[in-house]
Amino acid sequence: MNYVELLKKHLVNVYDRNSFVRLLDMKITELGEGEALLSMPVNPDKHTNLYHVLHGGALASLAD
C-alpha cells in the first residue's frame, strides 16, 4: 500500500468516527498528492437556512 492509499485509509477512518462530519454527510471523494475532493449532498432538511438556501455554516464546515 502506497502513501496516498495509507493516508486515504486514515482520513476515511477519522471521518467515520467524527459525528459532525457524519451529521453533515461529508465524504472523501478523491484523494491525491496535494489535493483532496470532498462531497456533501445538500439535504434541505439539514443543510439549508430559513430561506432554503445552503447554510453558510455547512459550506464553511465542508471547506474546513
Image (cartoon, rainbow, N blue to C red):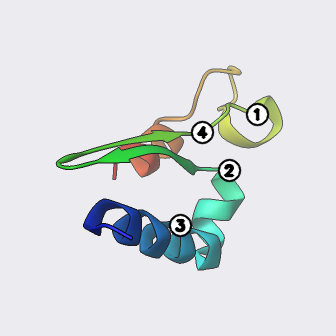
Q: Is residue 40 above or below residue 24?
A: above
| Mark 2 crowdedness (10 Å alpha carbons): few <14, some 14-19, many ≥20 | some
**Amino acid beneath label 1:** Asn
**Amino acid beneath label 3:** Val
Q: Which residue is mark 2?
A: 25
Q: Which residue is mark 3?
A: 12
Q: Which residue is mark 1?
A: 43
Q: Which residue is mark 4?
A: 40
Is the residue under label 4 in contact with that under label 1 (CB below 8 Å)?
no
Is the residue under label 4 in contact with that under label 2 (CB below 8 Å)?
yes
Labels 2, 1: front one: 2
Earlier in the chain: of badge 2 and badge 1, it is 2
Q: Secondary structure at mark 1?
A: loop
| Mark 1 crowdedness (10 Å alpha carbons): few <14, some 14-19, many ≥20 | few
Task: Answer with the quarter of the image where residue 36 lies.
Answer: top left
**Amino acid beneath label 4:** Met
Q: CA distance from mark 2 to mark 4?
A: 6 Å
Is the residue under label 1 in contact with that under label 3 (CB below 8 Å)?
no
Is the residue under label 3 in contact with that under label 4 (CB below 8 Å)?
no
Earlier in the chain: of badge 2 and badge 3, it is 3
Is the residue under label 1 in contact with that under label 2 (CB below 8 Å)?
yes
Q: CA distance from mark 4 to mark 3?
A: 14 Å
In this picture, residue 41 sits left or right of residue 55: right
Earlier in the chain: of badge 2 and badge 4, it is 2
Residue farthest to the right, as pictured: 45
Earlier in the chain: of badge 3 and badge 1, it is 3
**Amino acid beneath label 2:** Asp
